[in-house]
């Protein structure tokens, strides 16, 4: 999804990678057991993938941008399976993964309807009892400025549990932090 120069620079920086490693993922995944086979949706520049690859037995990441997917393949080699694909139409069989995650990327999905398809696909590829977890940003003046010219369809955290339930999840919860929210939804 399109990102402006400022946003690309931030998301590919060492400072962002450190924030992801030290703050974002520990908060987003606190008390979460993802299981053995995990799918990451939308890794982008790979800051989250760098953390996940050392913490789950088998990681698959699906990235819509072919250039980013190629860069991730070069970086992660045999440590993760990187697939170029669209998370709203995943090419994995039903019940393929124990856990599905996505971090700070939902607002780059071009419409609420496409986000809902992504949620339904996450549910479909999860094994029964599997967990969909992640985080995204809430809107603010700084957030809007950083996303000038970007695809930016923010997710309302108050409506997200109902959207996840409509996508097929049995339970869904959202907690808010400073400038962001985290979510967890379990497949029945």
Image (tube, rainbow, N blue to C red):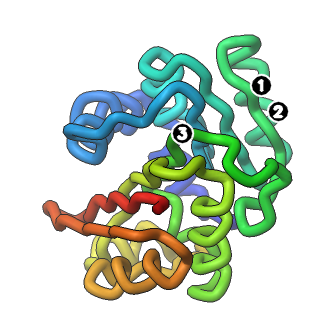
Residue with the mark numbered 1: 73
Q: Is residue 20 left or right of residue 151?
A: left
Q: Residues within 10 Å of mark 3 (few under 14, many from 20)?
A: many
> Does residue 28 show up?
yes
Residue with the mark numbered 3: 98
Give coordinates of residue 85: x percent, y percent: 82, 52
Residue shown at the point (40%, 53%) measured from the top left = 134
Give coordinates of residue 108: x percent, y percent: 58, 69
Dot 2: what SS? helix
Q: Residues within 10 Å of mark 1 (few under 14, many from 20)?
A: some
Look at the picture and state if 178 lies above or below 59: below
Whether label 3 touches label 2, CB < 8 Å: no
Dot 3: what SS? strand
Residue with the mark numbered 2: 70
Give coordinates of residue 47: x percent, y percent: 49, 33
Residue shown at the point (34%, 34%) measured from the top left = 33
Dot 1: what SS? helix
Whether label 1 touches label 2, CB < 8 Å: yes
Give coordinates of residue 15: x percent, y percent: 35, 33
Q: Quadrant of the N terminus?
A: bottom right
Q: Earlier in the sequence, mark 3 or mark 2?
A: 2
């Amino acid at each position: 999804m399109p990102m402006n120069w400022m946003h690309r620079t931030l998301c590919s920086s060492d400072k962002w990678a450190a924030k992801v490693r030290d703050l974002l993922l520990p908060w987003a995944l606190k008390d979460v057991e993802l299981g053995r086979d995990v799918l990451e949706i939308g890794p982008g520049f790979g800051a989250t993938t760098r953390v996940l690859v050392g913490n789950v037995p088998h990681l698959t990441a699906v990235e819509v941008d072919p250039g980013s997917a190629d860069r991730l393949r070069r970086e992660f080699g045999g440590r993760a399976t990187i697939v170029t694909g669209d998370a709203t139409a995943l090419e994995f069989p039903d019940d393929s993964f124990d856990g599905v995650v996505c971090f700070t990327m939902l607002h780059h999905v071009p419409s609420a309807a496409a986000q809902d398809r992504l949620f339904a696909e996450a549910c479909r590829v999860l094994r029964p009892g599997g967990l969909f977890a992640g985080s995204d940003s809430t809107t603010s003046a700084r957030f809007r400025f950083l996303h000038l010219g970007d695809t930016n369809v923010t997710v309302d955290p108050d409506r997200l549990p109902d959207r996840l339930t409509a996508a097929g999840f049995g339970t869904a919860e959202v907690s808010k932090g400073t400038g962001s929210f985290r979510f967890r939804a379990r497949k029945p």
